[in-house]
Structures are given as structure tokens and as C-alpha cells.
Image (cartoon, rainbow, N blue to C red):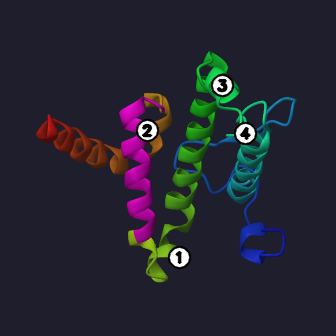
Amino acid sequence: MATDPYLKSFRPGEGFPSGVEYRWSDDGPPQSVSAPVYIEKVLGWIAEQMNDETQFPNDNDEAEALRVFQTPQFAALCGQIFRRLFRVYGIIYSSFFGTLDALDMAPHLNTCFKHFMFFCTEFGLLPEREVEPLEVLVKPIRKQYYMAKGASS
């Protein structure tokens, strides 16, 4: 990101869905950052969590993995990961959708987002206040999810 002039043109607080600003904190008070910087920080943070064997144990020790995966801390961490990924989708849709559409990549984004939302809906991973900025996208996806789930019951 650091070398892309377009991405560097965003100022702190810019590039977020209408009416929201996601801030970032590295062990201090939350700081205003631009949307591209927020995405970069989120993806870096998620990679750190996933690579930390105390958070996501190695599959070789099944007993330890099961112990960790059943803790409230693990559930909270997964919730935080999914909330932050949802925010990345919000930034992509609000600031970069036109570019992706021009590159004929919008259908891929929409499919990924739909599956992401199905998963989040199934497991209750997103608080309602988080989905509000993308409600116009989320509402029909959730409707489709519940209709499909009802049809399979």
C-alpha cells in the first residue's frame, strides 16, 4: 500500500462507509487513520493472531487445540476478527467498489461477501450495530439466508 499514490491520497478519517469512522489502537488510545491504513492494520493484526500458537494452537496437539477453542477468550477473539473483517468489507464497498466493478471483479466480491455474511449469520458473529453501515447490502443477504435455511428444515 505504501507505494500506491491513490491509496496514500486518503487522509485520516477518510474512506469509511457513510457516517462511520473506524479507528485503530496499538495499545493506546484509538487513532484516526485512513481506510487503506485501517485495512492494512486489520490484516496484519489478523495474521499475528492466526500465527500465535497460544491463540490458534498447532493441529498436532489436538487436546490443546480443543481446550483453547472451547474458551470464552477464543470465542471473543473470533468475534473481534469477524467484526474487523466486516469493516474491511464496508471500506471496500464504500471506497473501492467502482474500481472493482470496472475490473469486472464485483461479482467475486459480492459472492465472497454473501458467503461471509451467511457464516456470520449462522454463528451470530456480528452485533447489529456493526452491520448498520452496510444494511442495504446485508438485509437481502440475510433474507436469502433465512429463506434457504427455512426451506431446508
Span highlighted in magenta in the image: 108-125
Q: Distance between the residues labelled 3 and 2?
A: 26 Å
Most extreme residue toward the top, as rendered?
72
In the displayed structure image, the side of residue 64 where residue 89 appears, left or right: left
Crowding at dot 1, Cα within 10 Å, few <14 / some 14-19 / many 20+, comes out as few
Residue at position x 47%, y 33% in the image: 126
Disc 4 and disc 1 in contact, CB within 8 angstroms: no
The type of residue carrying mark 4 is Asn
Seen from the viewer's position, the closer of residues 85 and 132 is: 85
To which residue does mark 4 refer? 58
Q: Does 113 appear in magenta?
A: yes
**Horizontal and vertical percent position of residue 150:** 15, 36
Taking 92 as reference, is 47 above or below it? above
Q: Which mark is residue 120?
A: 2
Q: How far apart are marks 2 and 4 (CA)?
A: 24 Å
To which residue does mark 1 refer? 99
The type of residue carrying mark 1 is Thr
Characterize the magenta stretch by its predominant secondary structure: helix
Q: How far apart are marks 4 and 1 (CA)?
A: 39 Å
Helix, strand or loop for disc 1 = helix
Seen from the viewer's position, the closer of residues 66 and 79 is: 66
To which residue does mark 3 refer? 63
Quadrant in which residue 35 is drawn: bottom right
